[in-house]
Amino acid sequence: MPSSTKERILDSTAELFRRQGYTATGMKQIAADASAPFGSVYHFFPGGKEELGAEVIRTSGRLYMQIFVEVIAENPEVLDAVEAFFSGAGETLRETDYADACPIATVALEVASTNDTLRQATADVFEEWMAGATEYFVFAGIARVPARELAFSMLSLLEGAFIFCRAMRSTEPMAAAGAAAVALVRAALESSREGEG
Amino acid sequence: MPSSTKERILDSTAELFRRQGYTATGMKQIAADASAPFGSVYHFFPGGKEELGAEVIRTSGRLYMQIFVEVIAENPEVLDAVEAFFSGAGETLRETDYADACPIATVALEVASTNDTLRQATADVFEEWMAGATEYFVFAGIARVPARELAFSMLSLLEGAFIFCRAMRSTEPMAAAGAAAVALVRAALESSREGEG
């Protein structure tokens, strides 16, 4: 099924944000990349680049949550799921010539001190990720406070490793981050089991 | 001692990169911010924004290495040093209204797929950081291979936490990242001591 014009605009914008960030991405480039008439971009997003940017941040946030949920569904054991999540990120980086990483991180850093509407959109997505990962770790048997800490650590490892992998054109940082995340989850599981005993 | 015009240009550019990134920062804004004549920016950096950007990445990289070295000098115990490094990053974020984080990360993500000269400059800085942190962990008694993994994990935790702290306007992500880094270093120290025994 061919995607709608609006979907193509959102997909192209997400792709351009991932590769070059928010500031470098212009409305004309978005229209050209999406094979959409220039006017249609403003038809769907009358608020212009800021409205489109906020929508892309939200849809990308949901998409990445889905990837995490799919990895969990395929890996019933929590340690396997965390390992698969990081190795999958490393494979995607290598396959896309180190272009395809987090669609939100670049924009988040660009707008944090310059555009509060978009900063809030990135903060909302990050809070949803943290809440989702926290619930998952709680479900896996980790107490709530360490589960939330673990969610922050795991996603910080992932986002930090994306920066180093893309700059250094290597998956070594992601492999190290994945091993660290697995070690942290294992320690939290053991600690929570001891707490119960 | 008043700083030279060239130093002011480098400082202003680093500050602008930290707050808004590479793409959003123009040469006119740099000159105005540095109270330097517009022509002097091109006098010192005839290669324009790319040459200036590469120089700022290198000087910022050295500056951040110095901060790490100062924290180490003040904290002879490795676990204290790692904790102080993360708590210092959190304090700086709060004191600067979540603006003052890594001067290289935003630029690194913006240029990774779009400007290979600047990408290489960020990769060189990151490799120096990893080498420096690896040597430090080896000196602290950790075997070389886990020491390098630990360097990647610690700096990924830091860079990832910067993204979340700035977006969410909270130091909670940095506190979680710091606790995780300390736990990883402690486990590596214990594991290396067992390996010796």
Image (cartoon, coloured by chain):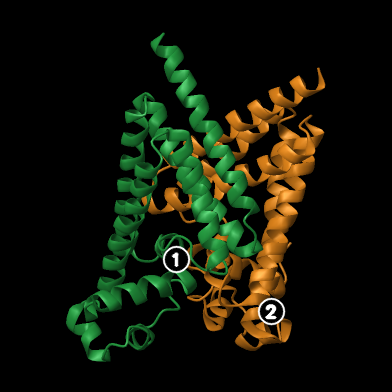
Chain colours: A orange, B green
Task: Give coordinates of residue A12: x percent, y percent.
Answer: 59, 69
Q: Residue, x 41% and y 8% (percent of image)? A: B197
Q: Which residue is mark 1?
A: B110
Q: Secondary structure at mark 1?
A: helix
> Alpha-carbon neighbours of circle 2 within 10 Å: few (<14), some, or many (≥20)?
some
Vertical placement of residue B46 versus A128, above or below: below
Q: Residue, x 51% and y 68% (percent of image)? A: A21
Q: Secondary structure at mark 2?
A: helix
Query: Do the residues at discs 2 and 1 belong to one chain?
Result: no
Task: Give coordinates of residue A143: x percent, y percent.
Answer: 78, 34
Q: Is residue A7 left or right of residue A33?
A: right
Q: Is residue A123 visible?
A: yes
Res B13 → quadrant: bottom left
Foreground residue among A31 and A92: A92
Circle 1: residue type: Glu
Circle 2: residue type: Glu
Q: Is residue A52 left or right of residue B42?
A: right
Res B76 → quadrant: top left
Foreground residue among B168 and A5: B168
> Alpha-carbon neighbours of circle 1 within 10 Å: few (<14), some, or many (≥20)?
many
Q: Which residue is mark 2?
A: A51
